[in-house]
Amino acid sequence: MAEKSFAAALNEQISNEFAASQQYVAAAVYYDTETLPRLAAFFYRQALEEREHAMIMIRYLLDVGESVEIPDIKAVPTTYADGSEPVKMALEQEKRVSQEIFSLFELARELKDYRAEQFLQWFVKEQVEEVALMGDLLNVVERSRENLLLAEDFIAREKMGEEGADPTAPPAADEAE
Ligand code: FEO
């Protein structure tokens, strides 16, 4: 028998998503301080996406009649050794989140919670995209290590991370029903 309920595990993931959002705000602030506005904008957008992930999970718990816990906010550093470090951190974070989503998926299967399993499908796809995006960005910043203005040009030209809202995303708690 599973050690915890799916709702408890999803509440933990809501905390992880808000933490990821904070982490990306910190990365954005770092790049903003370094006058690298495209990298800053990229991470401000990612921060909003992570908040959106938390809101989608909150909507799901509300819809299935479970209680929602809103976590404490922990401080995160806004200084980094160099311009590629925030992206390395972000790639590691996205890989970790993928594993967390897989664990939730396994729990849903173990509990035979079919609606939870179906709910998580979108997150499995989303994590493939997010890991790929951060991997691409890491290539770009590492190639531009001596001059991050080259990365700024690339991000602007290729509109990295500007795909806009995904119409297949499940509903979020803060959107009108
Ligand atoms: Fe919500 Fe990028 O994981």
Image (tube, rainbow, N blue to C red):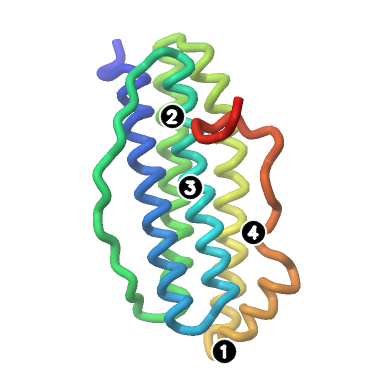
Q: Earlier in the sequence, mark 3 or mark 4?
A: 3
Residue bearing mark 2: 58
Where 105 sits versus 157, above or below?
Answer: above
Q: Nearer the viewer, mark 2 or mark 4?
A: 2
Q: Amino acid at mark 2?
A: Ile
Q: Residues within 10 Å of mark 2 (few under 14, many from 20)?
A: many
Q: Nearer the viewer, mark 1 or mark 2?
A: 2
Instruction: Residue under label 3, please give it.
Output: 50
Residue at the right extreme, as displayed: 157
SS class, disc 1:
loop
**Marks 2/4: CA distance?**
24 Å
User: What residue does disc 4 label?
Assistant: 161
As displayed, is residue 82 above or below residue 116? below
Compared with residue 110, is residue 165 higher up or lower down, i.e. above or below?
Answer: below
C-alpha separation, residue under disc 3 versus residue under disc 1: 29 Å
- Label 4 residue SS: loop
